[in-house]
Amino acid sequence: MEWGIINKNNFKDKTTYDIPIKRWDPLSTVRIKSKDFGVRKKRERYYGHYSYLSPIRGKRPKGYDTVEKKSEFEHCPKKIYARVKDVFMAVTEGKPIYDNWGYQLGDGFTIIIAEDDKKCDNPFLDTPHQIERIPNSCKAITLINRYPSMARIIDPEIEKCITEELPPHLKLARGINLVTISRKFYPSLCFNLIPEEIIAGIFLSMKTAILYCVQEAIERDYYDIPVNPFFNIGMKVGGSQPRIHSQVYIDLNGDGHGSRLEGFLRAFKEMGENCHLCETSHGDTDRIILKTEFWTFYTTGSPVRNYHIRFHPNEHLRRFSQLKINQINDLAKSLKIIFQAIDDIKIDKNRNLLFNSCPFGYDADFHMFGDIIPHEVIGGAEMADDMRVARKLPHIAAAEIRESIIKYLN
Ligand SMILES: [Zn+2]
């Protein structure tokens, strides 16, 4: 069931519980009754906490198989990573790739949605294939995730059986999982070493793929589509491959959204005309760490972890996929500076980079924003509630980062 495909061939010796499942937690799920966000057809919709349960996710290859290999990637001298072979190399080279001991790292089969800003395979293509070697001039490519948490294509007869067998609180998880990689190998933990145009290329390829997937999904009568683009940088925050890569979760269940997004949607609704991100000075500017022509970066006043940084385009845009080329280029440049500056003050290199956007089909106001969340071990109380304890005062964290950034400006 790789690539989110469930057909008679791969399902024949499997059971209902081998498929990706979406489960809403009955203790924190509320039915959406209002016509506020996106309701269009007669379908039950919820907000709250949900989990994707996907056995295939556990099958994905781990890029760091030895301690030596891991430390190589962390120190990342260029002469080492120029020779690195990884599972994605089989895709970029369009053929099977073996490591120095003859072990096959990848078979070269893929479904490729976008090469830079050029659309490629249809997002609902049902057969993976080998592609031509990707030219060196290409910066980034977006693929269908081979080990997804949602199913993209399901044989209608199997779907019927599964739906009958599953208890009512469980459902087949439908959606598209994308992964975007750099054409050449760059180690994800050394964001500062990745050329600006490659980072921008990754964003551009993600944007192209999102728009292509959503357009094709709408043609297939999917609607109300939450889209979550993110980077897990480093093994401690879920990054299982050493090459820089991002992911996008496109949920096609049309059954609502998580409680965090509900909070954002309601907050923006309450703001009405007076968008907080358009108007705020972020604590009279003492939490701003970088302001460019296109973006504002600041330490959030309610951090999820110490040194939690938020950023938003200065223009009021609702979605990641609306970013224009000059905003994308400036974001790549600014992120590189900020990542270097926080590396310099010894903040954990394992970080999540998340983008919060308005779902497609929702008639809601929203100002897209991103989060940079450095890894930290958190305690039990934090898991139990939507609350975090941070010891670093946000304006002091901002002052430290600002001081570290100065040397990289101009
Ligand atoms: Zn705004």
Image: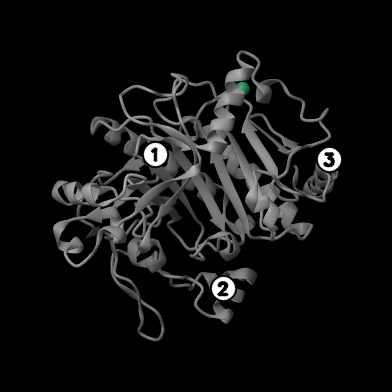
- SS at badge 3: helix
Q: Residue at x 30, y 25 (%)?
A: 42
Q: Position of residue 197 (x, y in %)?
A: 53, 47
Name the quadrant containing residue 206: top left
Is any atom of residue 72 visible in this view? Answer: yes
* Residue 395 position (above or below residue 6): above
Q: Residues within 10 Å of mark 1 (few under 14, many from 20)?
A: many
Q: Earlier along the polypeptide chain: callout 2 or callout 1?
A: 2
Q: Position of residue 139 (x, y in %)?
A: 44, 51
- Judging depth in this view, the residue of 376 and 110 nearest the camera is 376
Q: Residue at x 41, y 66 (%)?
A: 58
Q: Quadrant of ligand 1?
A: top right
Q: Earlier along the polypeptide chain: callout 1 or callout 3?
A: 1
* Residue 202 position (above or below residue 41): below
- SS at badge 1: helix
Is any atom of residue 125 visible in this view? Answer: no
For the residues marked 3 and 2, what is the alpha-carbon distance in whole angstroms?
39 Å
Q: Which mark is residue 125?
A: none
Q: Residues within 10 Å of mark 3 (few under 14, many from 20)?
A: many
Do the numbered discs 3 and 2 sit on residues whose CB atoms are within 8 Å?
Answer: no
Q: Residue at x 57, y 25 (%)?
A: 266
Q: How many marks?
A: 3
Q: Earlier along the polypeptide chain: callout 3 or callout 2?
A: 2
Q: Quadrant of the C terminus?
A: top right
Q: Which mark is residue 395?
A: 3
Q: Amino acid at mark 1?
A: Ile
Circle 1 is placed at which residue position? 210
Do the numbered discs 2 and 1 sit on residues whose CB atoms are within 8 Å?
Answer: no
Q: Amino acid at mark 3?
A: His
